Amino acid sequence: MPRHRDTTRTVGFVVVAAGVAIFSTDALLIRLQGMPVPQILFWRGVLSALGFGAVTCIASRGHIVRAVLTLGWVGLAIALLRGAANIAFVLSVEETSVAQAFVILATTPLMTALLSKLLVADHLPRRTWLTALAAAAGVTVIFAGSFGTPQLAGDLWAIAGGLSISLTLVIVRSSKNLDRFAAMAAGCALGVIPVLPFLGAGIGISAPNALVAFLNGAVVLPAAVALVTLGPKYLPAPEVSLFLLLETVMAPLWVWLVLGQQPEARTVIAGAVVLAALAFHSAAELSDERRRMRATAAGGSQELAPEAAAPGL
């Protein structure tokens, strides 16, 4: 049994690490396209819809139309929010530094917890409030340096993207049977619609940009989301959250190494505060999760003991 558990954890580590590593290239691929933002959003939406559609087709064993049609109003709301989050993310990456955008987006789990408290009346432990305060302090440092600069718009778009994702997660909790990949595909497709009036330059795309856009939309996003979504099947959710923090470090690193865009000192400091707070929170959640698992295992072994003494029953 322990060997099976170790194998399961190893698979979980590999799956989530691969998902995070792939995800971390997203911002770099957006920057490499070198097209007007409306064109990036158009092709990202179209190609991501195709990519997530392919994942949905595989997951539903070919019943993709049924998967989309059964989304219902809740699925439509999630699709609209995912589409909005996609647009906000691209705008944030284009209008502020990648490091600032990802530090702000790293606070999405806290936004989700606070929205759950507000909308669903969930109980929040003291450590969540303390983590939220620390993260708010870090984000405040970022905004303080952005006032009066074009980066402020990008920071605000990052907040908008985080809120859209948070609302999505709160709604998903009440719809456990929802096909998330079908909702993602629909969201990417719907996200194209508000972009259409801004395509003054048309949708023409060069061969190099087409290759990068295809890699970004049809490969990277669906593959990364699919791998990260599989994570909780093998690892506790708080452990997956700890892995996801690596994206906040890796995404600006790729942009720095490839494009030479070095993060500002204040962003690094603010990011360190936010990541330290989130890491502490996830580690505490993981400790609680393992304690619950040990308690459950101990309870289970006590219940099975009598049967072990009487194998004939």
Image (cartoon, helix red, strand yellow):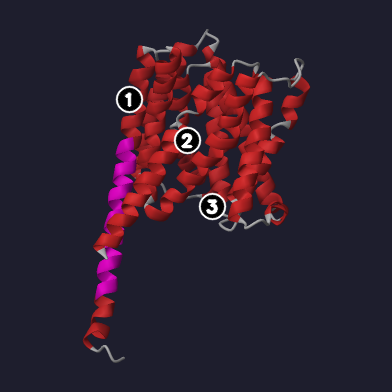
Residue situated furthest left in the rendering: 309
**How far is the residue under mark 2 from the one under mark 3?**
15 Å
The first of marks 2 and 1 along the sequence is 2
Looking at the rendering, the stretch of residues picked out in magenta corresponds to 279-301
Residue topped by disc 3 = 173
Determine the residue located farthest toward the top in the rendered image: 148
Q: Is residue 54 visible?
A: yes
Relative to 114, is 213 on the left or the right? Answer: right
Residue 253 lies, in percent from the top left, at 39, 22
Main SS class of the magenta portion in the image: helix
Please provide percent x and percent y for residue 238. 36, 46
User: Gap in Å between the C-alphas at discs 2 and 1?
Assistant: 16 Å
Name the residue carrying label 1.
272
Is residue 78 visible in the rendered image? The answer is no
Disc 1 secondary structure class: helix
Mark 1 or mark 3, earlier in chain: 3
The circle drawn on residue 108 is 2
Q: Residues within 10 Å of mark 1 (few under 14, many from 20)?
A: some
Q: Is residue 45 above or below residue 204?
A: below
| Relative side of 156 to 303, left or right | right
- Image-based side of 85 in relation to 192, left or right: left
State the residue in front, 23 or 269. 23
